Image: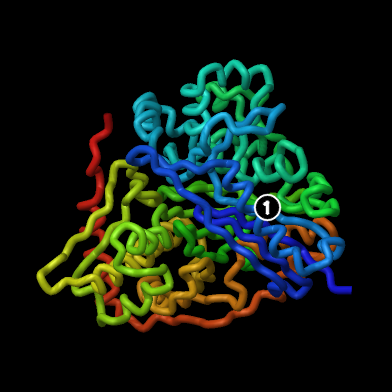
Amino acid sequence: MTQYILALDQGTTSSRAILFDHEGKIAGCAAQEFPQHFPQPGWVEHDPNEIWNSQITVARKVLQDFDVKKVRAIGITNQRETTVVWDRKTGEPIAPAIVWQDRRTADYCEELRAAGKAKMICEATGLELDAYFSATKVKWILDHVPGARERARKGALCFGTIDSWLAWKLCGVHVTDVSNASRTMLFNIHLMRWDADLLQLFDVPEAMLPQVVSSSEEIGATREALFGHAIPVAGIAGDQQAATFGQACHQPGMVKNTYGTGCFMLMHAGRQPRTSHNRLLSTVGWRVDGATDYMLEGSVFMGGATVQWLRDGLGIIQQSSDVEALANSVPDSGGVFLVPAFVGLGAPHWDPYARGTIVGLTRGSNKAHIARAAVESIAYQSAELLAAMQKDASMPVTEVRADGGAARNDMLMQFQSDLLGVPVLRPKVTETTALGAAYLAGLAVGFWESQEEIATQWACERRFTPAMGDDQRAELLAKWNRATERAKAWETPL
């Protein structure tokens, strides 16, 4: 009897549900976009109920042609850092979710930096002091919703990232896994617990925090009314850690890069946290069978979202998939560089006041050059991450495994390999974020026996190898650096 694992992949712009069989192949898939809300410049919000409704809709849709009793378990993977606070009794959010891209707390982060708190935070959490992470977001909600902090102290409110929100709605449990906890800027990755000093610093009551669980364990079962049958929820991981697991990057030195809304490059760092000296993040990858694997991570805030801006903001393409043909209609960007710092710059710059910039325009520049510069910007930003990783790592990177929606763009993948100077490998299954969540859930219920078995399922669909000379690569990267410098510190801190 064929059995399945259901992965719920809750992303920044869409919710997906994918059913995997024992060979790691997709048996069914459904996806639905949901609204983004931008109430002020630099603010990015979601309605938690819209997230839930889109996620349960696609889950039911993908299961409608299958026997629900053949689904052994559910794995959850999610946009990270996005912060939800809800009433423990009613289950209703007390405010919109503040999305990871949101910059409203950037000035507060600067105040903390001026007060000398950045080192303390980094030493405990492995993270840069930045508005990207959850701690300042939950503090903002508690500061701005009347009575919220007092209610939180009494245990009446729950805080969680999106995995916690989905687990609550599915099973009625208040949990998060170690990978998501490590992205809150409240979790000590050395002691593997919530950090009392950080809770005090951000004035976040411990009573509102979720229980921290492993990435691969049964946390409960879905309420029977949701699917007509209770299904164990047995795996949770933040989207980038899940993608790394799904790419079978289980050994130190292996690297994957996900090309989603943002771009996220992770290197397996082993069983101990590795401190970055090049402004990368040290983060928890996953915890399976009592063993914790750590990662080095570089985060780019605007990857595929840059292409969405071409579609929704400029209107020069009708749908995101049109960008490759438009970009390929010119041999190069014609000297145009687009730095997509719409919400600041992530690693290795960490400049919340940078803003989007286009340089090198001439009268001969047209929409195709801008489209090509937008696609190339994704590769340039990722090249900066790998350069920083190479400096931090004790071993050379020999390949990068690519996934995510934009990884289907052959032009981008070839240009990426050219800039990195190493092969870029695209797997047969590019839905590796969902696959990683499925693997973690499947391991917990014995659907798969081991990580070694999982690694044998990984297969390369296409290998892109460098075809650019060293001099040209160096020249392009130097121009990119000049363009990036022009984008920095555009906004002035208050």
Quarter location, residue 4: bottom right
Residue 75 picture location, percent across and down: 72, 56
Query: Is 160 displayed left or right of 113 in the figure?
Result: right
Q: Is residue 250 visible?
A: no
Spot the residue most to the right: 1
Q: Is residue 201 above or below residue 320?
A: above
Question: Which residue is painted at 70% across and 64% down in the image?
Answer: 62
**Quadrant in which the N terminus appears:** bottom right
Tag 1: amino acid:
Ile
Which of 250/48 is in front?
A: 48
Front residue of this view, candidates 7 and 190: 7
* Residue at image point 67% right, 56% down: 8
**Residue at (46% x, 58% y) in the render:** 261
Residue 443 appears in the picture as rendered? yes
Residue 156 vertical placement versus 19 (above, below): above
Q: How is the image coloured?
A: rainbow
Q: Is residue 96 left or right of residue 372?
A: right
Which residue is nearer to you in this view: 39 or 12? Answer: 39
- Residue at figure coordinates x 35%, y 49% from the top left: 345
In the picture provided, is 298 more to the left or to the right than 440?
left
The tally of labels here is 1
Residue 230 sits above or below residue 402 on the image: above
Q: Position of residue 424 (x, y in %)?
A: 48, 75
Residue that label 1 marks: 56
Placement of the C terminus among the 4 image quadrants = top left
The picture places residue 384, in percent across and down from the top left corner, at 37, 60
Residue 447 picture quarter: bottom right
